[in-house]
Image (spheres, helix red, strand yellow):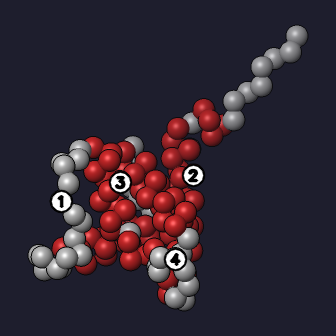
Amino acid sequence: MTESPEPSSAAADPAGRLSEVSRLASLLADRVLSAQIASQPIPKAHIHALLDAAIILEKYEVRLPPLLEQMVETLEDEDAGKPAGTGAEEPATEPVEGEEADAKRLAWLFRPFQGTKS
């Protein structure tokens, strides 16, 4: 008789998968910060991956990796310090709730890391 293959430990362990997401997000956040410091362009895919990781980790109430958390807090602080009516704010749209609101908020906060648009 042939036995069905054992599922991988990562597939059977959601906490392990979330831990891996956190680990990879930490590595990518370090890479993005290094690129920003060196004034190198940051691929949009990296920003999207960090956004996705932050949303997933927040959804499952897993603490963000320290560097990613610091980036988000710094951006939130900078955003909070902007005077109203500067024209750099998000255009008014219909109220959005849940994950979509989180995604839009995080995407807007990560805009300084996107570099120049081509």
Check disc 3 and report the residue beneath it: 103
Secondary-structure class at tag 4: loop
Taking the view exactly as shown, the residue that stands out farthest to the right is 1
Check disc 2 and report the residue beneath it: 20
Q: Name the side, left or right, on which 18 lies relative to 93.
A: right
In what quadrant of the picture does the N terminus appear?
top right
Amino acid type of disc 1?
Ala
- Of callouts 2 and 1, which one flags the residue occurring earlier in the amino acid sequence? 2
Where residue 10 appears, as percent x and y from the top left, is 63, 40
Q: Label 2 to label 1, Cα distance in Å?
A: 36 Å
Check disc 1 and report the residue beneath it: 92
- Closer to viewer: mark 1 or mark 3: 1
Q: Name the side, left or right, on which 67 lies relative to 108.
A: right
Q: Label 1 to label 4, Cα distance in Å?
A: 26 Å
Whether label 2 touches label 1, CB < 8 Å = no
Q: Name the side, left or right, on which 74 lies relative to 28.
A: left
- How packed mark 3 is, by other alpha carbons closer than 10 Å (few <14, some 14-19, many 20 or more), is some
- How packed mark 1 is, by other alpha carbons closer than 10 Å (few <14, some 14-19, many 20 or more), is few
- Closer to viewer: mark 4 or mark 3: 4
Q: Label 2 to label 4, Cα distance in Å?
A: 32 Å
- Of callouts 4 and 3, which one flags the residue occurring earlier in the amino acid sequence? 3
Quarter residue 104 falls in:
bottom left
- Of callouts 1 and 4, which one flags the residue occurring earlier in the amino acid sequence? 1
Where residue 65 appears, as percent x and y from the top left, is 45, 63
Where residue 102 appears, as percent x and y from the top left, is 31, 52
Amino acid type of disc 3?
Ala
Q: Label 4 to label 3, Cα distance in Å?
A: 23 Å
Residue 117 in view of the camera: yes
Q: Which mark is residue 118?
A: 4
- Closer to viewer: mark 2 or mark 1: 1
- Of callouts 3 and 2, which one flags the residue occurring earlier in the amino acid sequence? 2
- Of callouts 1 and 3, which one flags the residue occurring earlier in the amino acid sequence? 1
